Amino acid sequence: MTICRSWRFVVDDIVGDCRQEIADRSARGFNAPTLTSLQLVVRVKDQPDMTSLKAPTAETDTDIRLVADSCHALQTADLRGFKLEASALRRLARANASSLRELTLPAGISDWQLEALLKPLKALETLNLSLPVDSTGKWLWLLPKSLKRLDITGKTAVRYQITS
């Protein structure tokens, strides 16, 4: 993809400002509890070995596609607050198939989104989710053998401890 120089300078300027803001907050001892979507993207790009992912806000206004291709060493991921798209979930899961140990999913996730996530995951130990509405239960067959704990919330919370 080719970008004209004018646009490239604008984008670099914005990203540079975000990096400086993050650095300034860190220098003053602030760990910002919430980041903007752009700040999250900058942080993910700057820290390719990041082990934990969480959305900048609780509202679902951050598109998972912004970071799906950049995270490759996640151990924990809390996907509440992200707009979820199956293709991006699949890319995120494939990139972290052997490292992701704990996954928390938002209420309202569909069966097909859950299936896209679970297929590649091989090292997952803990899964926290709300039961998909009108679930067929097909996703249960995709739970990895490494899973040790499954927490399902909804009308009644259920916790499964899996022992070998």
Image: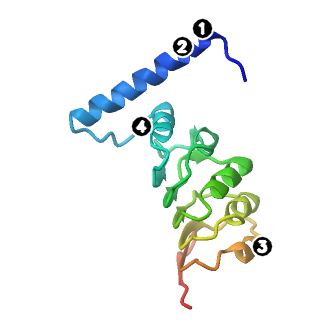
Question: Given the image, on which type of amino acid does mark 4 rest?
Answer: Leu
| Mark 3 crowd level (few <14, some 14–19, many ≥20, 10 Å Cα) | few
The earlier-in-sequence mark between 4 and 2 is 2
- Residue 11 falls left or right of residue 92: left
The residue at the point 65 percent across, 75 percent down is 144
Looking at the rendered structure, the secondary structure element under dot 1 is helix
- Determine the residue positioned at 42% across, 37% down: 35
- Mark 3 — residue? 138
Is 161 rendered above or below residue 96?
below
First in residue order: circle 2 vs circle 3 = 2
The span from disc 2 to disc 3 (Cα, nearest Å) is: 46 Å
Residue 6: assigned label:
1
Q: Nearer the viewer, residue 116 or 134?
A: 116
What residue sits right under mark 2 in the picture? 10
Closer to the camera: disc 2 or disc 3?
Answer: 2
Instruction: Report the front residue among 16 and 118.
Output: 16
Could you tell which of marks 3 and 4 lies nearer the N-terminus?
Answer: 4
At which x and y percent is residue 12?
A: 51, 19
Which numbered disc, 1 or 3, marks the residue closer to the eye? 1
Q: Amino acid at mark 2?
A: Val
Whether label 2 touches label 1, CB < 8 Å: yes
- Image quarter in which the N terminus is found: top right
Measure the alpha-carbon separation of dots 4 and 1.
27 Å
User: What label does residue 35 carry, if any?
Assistant: 4
The percent position of residue 116, horizontal first and vertical second, equals: 73, 59
Q: Residue at x 64, y 66 (%)?
A: 121
In the image, farthest residue toward the bottom:
164
Q: How many other residues sit within 10 Å of disc 4, few (<14), some (14-19) or many (≥20)?
A: some
Secondary structure of residue under mark 3: helix
